[in-house]
Amino acid sequence: MNAVSQIEPLVVPAGEGPFVELGDHRAHIKVTAQASNGELVLAETKVDFRGGVPPHVHTREDETFYIQEGRFDVRVGDRKIEAGPGDTVFAPRNVPHAWNCVSEGGGQVLVLITPGANFEAFAIRMAQRGYVPSAAMEDPATLAEFMALAEQHGIQMLPNK
């Protein structure tokens, strides 16, 4: 039997799933890395106006965004995209990307990380330490520790341009 056939079916009701708080955005993890044998993480993420993540590069995973509500400015490589409900943006590993919510009422995005285990561990560690990625990048008191945590997970945080 291969690993895929050993994965159990899963139903996660609306509003449920492990919760990760990152200040200006928060998520319910709908499919955990454990549930998918590390293949993916799927998170329903609510984002405040101007909330998001500064420029960074994942070296171990791809990130896909499906916009459910609101509008988001997304940068992937040299492309700047304004995405709205129904739009999907794919950010492959090793390509710099950033995103933030530009709708005053906030927004919601479904985020798919493949593979998922490494990034899920990173997000949980950020939440446990109370990091808000954009604020951690601007705070001299947390910058070095935040950057080190990101590097441990193969994520390079970049200067905001």
Image (cartoon, rainbow, N blue to C red):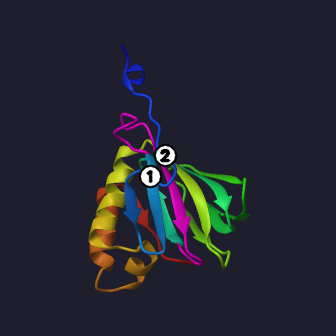
x then y, percent, for residue 128? 28, 66
Determine the image quadrant of residue 156: bottom left
Residue behind mark 2: 13
Give yes or no for residue 43 being in the magenta stretch.
yes
Q: Residues within 10 Å of mark 1 (few under 14, many from 20)?
A: few
Amino acid type for the residue under numbered disc 2 = Pro
66 sits left or right of 18 in the view? right
User: CB atoms at circles 2 and 1 under 8 Å apart?
Assistant: yes
Q: To which quarter of the image does residue 106 belong? A: bottom right
The residue depicted at 32 percent of the width and 73 percent of the height is 130
The residue under label 1 is 16
Most frequent secondary structure within the magenta stretch: loop
Left or right of residue 52: residue 6: left
Q: Is residue 110 above or below residue 84?
A: above
> Element type at marker 2?
loop
Residue depicted at 30% across the width and 80% down the height: 142
- The location of residue 43, given as percent across then percent down, is 49, 52
Residue 75 pos. (x, y %): 63, 65
14 shown above or below 98 = above
Task: Tell me the magenta residue range.
Answer: 31-51
On the rendered structure, is 123 left or right of 114? left
45 shown above or below 50: above
